[in-house]
Image: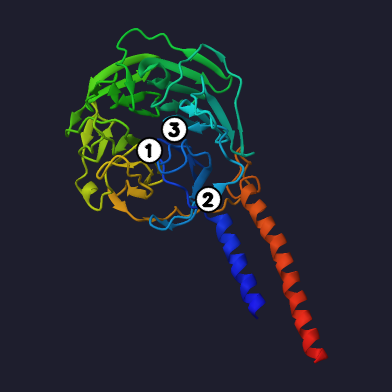
Amino acid sequence: MYFLIKFIFYIIFLINSILCYDPPPRTYHNSVIINDRLIIIGGDKPVTEVPGGTYELIYLDLSKSFDNTNLSWNLVHEGDLPISTWSSTAIVSLDNSTIFLIGGMFDKNTHDYVSNPVYTYNYLNSKWTKPSITGDSVPIRQRMTGVIDDSGIIYIFGGYNFTTFGEVYNEMNTLDTSSMTWKTLSIINNLPPLSNGYSASILPNGIIVYFGGLDGNVTLAPMKNVSNNLSIIFNSKNATGNDVDSRWLFASVLTPDGHIIIFGGCDLNYISVSPKLAILNTNKSPYEWSIPSSSEINSPPSIYGHTANLYYNYMIITFGYDADTNYVIYNSTVYLYDITNNTWVTRFNPPPPPSPSPSPSTPTSTPSPHSPKFLKPLLIGLGAIGVLICIAIFVFYKKRNEILKIAGSN
């Protein structure tokens, strides 16, 4: 019986160690959603950790319910980044097969800045590669946000260059994900100021909305100054509505009905701003800011250097610095905001699965998250457990037979 109890304990321990992962806190990371996975990429670790960024690829399974105080993170065992990265930008391809990681990369060993960095992650094969890219030369940078349009072109505006003593840009570069070609757009009129740490969202009509962030290195942009970009033409307009503190290093999501929800950020002294949460209505002309009255109830602390992603009716906020205490305090909690009720919640419940189709549907280019390819890291782990189970059973019965043999001889 002793051997059996010990065997069961080891099996439970091994299963938990493979299926669950306790990630270190981080800031200035990236997060994207592919199918039912919230994937966290890179980020800067606390100063108490080994210097450098985080290399592992982790995710939350959004097909299952969870409580934000008891998270089951998963580690992609073959997903380690070839570099360390923070304050970069990550964009998912139109077919959900590839993550494009741009800017903010450092050598793992020397911690030197990597020049003109672009890496791609093949989600189906769990493989990072450095693609060959032609076209115009683009500056290395951090603190920028990329968006992708319906034709697969990624737009990168502005950014901050750590290698040139803090040079800031206001040029627009595009990366064609089909031809893998960089292009610097020629924009003369209404060009926004030098900018980094801003928000960027692309609307269904192709307009890219920019606001917030740092103008150059000296002032914060007023949140009511909004820039639109369509067909490489910038237009600036003033938003109306509630007053919203200027900020940078905040996060935003675009809802299906055309509202941009922002959360967090800080001022130039890395102190919290007010309100923590605000909504920009892009359906009105001019755009209009509003502050939901219920958004302060059970609100998280003010954070910056975090990310936000929208999954159905949840805005999911991950990691960052806690601006309400001290800028060296890292936030390791996931916060959930229900956009349908404008309330903070602690419980995540995925939408019910769609009803089965009466007739077979045509397979899409992207498999289900439950397909063998996506379960590869898990299956490897379970395969290892299977071998250990067989060994443990063999050892258990061998010991049992020895005990019975000794007892019989006596």
What residue is disc 1 on?
Answer: 256
Cα–Cα gap, marks 2 and 3: 20 Å
Disc 3: CA contacts within 10 A as few (<14), some (14-19) or many (>=20): many
Mark 1, Cα crowd under 10 Å, few <14 / some 14-19 / many 20+, is: few
The picture places residue 248, in percent across and down from the top left corner, at 29, 30
Q: Which residue matches tag 3?
A: 86
Which residue is denoted by mark 2 in the rendering? 74
Where is residue 210 shown, x and y percent of the image? Answer: 32, 25
Quadrant placement of the N terminus: bottom right
* Secondary structure at numbered mark 1: loop
Q: Are marks 3 and 1 in contact (CB under 8 Å)?
A: no
Q: Amino acid at mark 2?
A: Asn
Query: Where 37 sits versus 347, above or below?
Result: above
Name above or below for residue 254 compared with residue 331.
Answer: above
- Between the C-alphas of marks 3 and 1, the distance is 29 Å
Q: Quadrant of residue 390?
A: bottom right
Question: 163 left or right of 249?
Answer: right
Q: Is residue 94 visible?
A: no
Give the amino acid type for the residue marked by disc 3 in the picture: Trp
Marks 2,3: beta carbons within 8 A: no
Which of the pair 361/273 is nearer the observer? 273
Rounded to the nearest angstrom, the CA distance separating label 1 from label 2 is 28 Å
